[in-house]
Amino acid sequence: MYLVLPYYGGDKQKMHAWTWFAIAGVFVVLEILNFSLVFASFAMGAVFAALARLITPNVPAQWVLFALATVLSLRLKPILTRYIFRKTPPSDTGIRALIGQKAVATSQISDSSGTITLKNETWTARSEGGTIEIGQNVTVTRIDGAVAVVILRSESQVN
């Protein structure tokens, strides 16, 4: 019997610290596979039980500390879940990112032709509100195919 169950010798029940660390390792592997933060709570409880074993050989105290640490870390799960899985605000990409951007007229812009410099690139442009002279600041209102539709940027908009 001693060879099969080495932790139970005679009348005394023994549980080594490495056993608790092994249990914590199993829970960490399960957490990595699942990522629900439940197994991480059990792993935290096992680590605290292992630390308790290093302080005292009292097995019931180790189990009580395991249970307390697990329950307390489970209470933190909603807070950690909100923090870890928080959503970042969506950012515009591609053509949508150009809408509202400041540009500079590099040629005279009319309702049918012109060019601008937008984010260090030269774009074909046309105006929505009359003629825009070279060097004036404009704002992109929309993109029509490969043509930027712009309006004159007012002084209050210049930043």
Image (cartoon, helix red, strand yellow):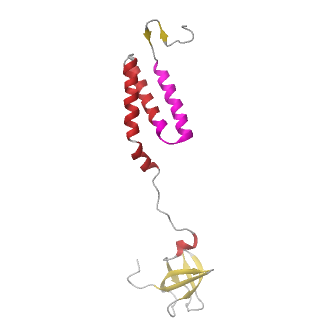
Q: Which residues are magenta?
A: 16-40
Q: Is residue 76 above or below residue 14?
A: below
From the viewer's side, name the closer residue of 17 and 106. Answer: 17
Quarter of image, res 59: top left
- Expressed as whole percent of the image width and height from the top left, the position of residue 97 reads 53, 71
- Expressed as whole percent of the image width and height from the top left, the position of residue 63 reads 40, 23
Q: Quadrant of the C terminus?
A: bottom left
- Expressed as whole percent of the image width and height from the top left, the position of residue 107 reads 56, 88
Q: Residue furthest top?
A: 10
Residue 34 part of the magenta-drawn span: yes
Q: Main secondary structure of the magenta part?
A: helix
- Expressed as whole percent of the image width and height from the top left, the position of residue 123 reads 59, 80
Quarter of image, res 47: top left
Q: Is residue 40 above or below residue 130?
A: above
The residue at the point 53 percent across, 30 percent down is 26
The residue at the point 41 percent across, 27 percent down is 66
The residue at the point 38 percent across, 23 percent down is 52
The residue at the point 49 percent across, 91 percent down is 129
